[in-house]
Amino acid sequence: MREDIGIETLIDLHDQIIDQDGGYWVKIEAWRVDSTAEFPHGIRYSLTLHEPYGKRILGYDNAHAVKPTKKFKHVGRRLTYDHKHRHVSDKGVPYEFQDAQQLLVDFFNEVDRVLKEVMLK
């Protein structure tokens, strides 16, 4: 397995709160843990987008297991920990973690998409 150089960037962003347009904000939490079956990347992370009053409206994390969806049938009965919450009431859907840099790219692309949607309302 190749070294994930983006992990240092992600760890450096730990505890950052980044203001977005319209009072929305992003919070990043990331820290090293021992590599296990649940956390094979050796990190715990939570990247969240919040509305102006603090409610999370988007999140990517590996804090708990989620059941694979039919789309991820090839995974079998294995529970995945990497997942995303696409809206306030979403319990989470599997996220295919490639590396920390791609996680940041995917998350901020989704933040841009969500903010564009809410600003059009």
Image (cartoon, grey):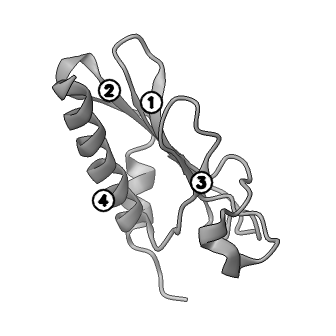
Name the N-terminal-most of marks 2 and 3. 2
> Residue 69 location, x and y as percent?
66, 62
Residue ranking furthest to the right: 77
Q: Circle 3 sits on which residue? A: 93
Residues marked 1 and 4 touching at CB (< 8 Å): no
Query: Eyeballing the image, is 81 above or below 51?
Result: below
Residue sitting at 32 percent across and 26 percent down? 25
Looking at the rendered image, the disc whose residue lies closer to the viewer, 2 or 3, is 3
Instruction: Estimate the spatial distance between the alpha carbons at disc 1 and disc 2, rounded to whole Å.
Output: 10 Å
Residue ranking furthest to the top: 53
| Kind of residue indicated by mark 1 | Ile
Instruction: Estimate the spatial distance between the alpha carbons at disc 2 and disc 3, rounded to whole Å.
Output: 22 Å
Residues marked 1 and 3 touching at CB (< 8 Å): no
Q: Circle 4 sits on which residue? A: 105
Name the N-terminal-most of marks 1 and 2. 2
Left or right: where does residue 101 sit relative to residue 63? left
Residue sitting at 40 percent across and 10 percent down? 53
| Kind of residue indicated by mark 3 | Val
Q: Circle 1 sits on which residue? A: 57
In which image quadrant can residue 105 be found? bottom left
Looking at the rendered image, the disc whose residue lies closer to the viewer, 3 or 4, is 3
Name the disc covering residue 95, or none.
Answer: none
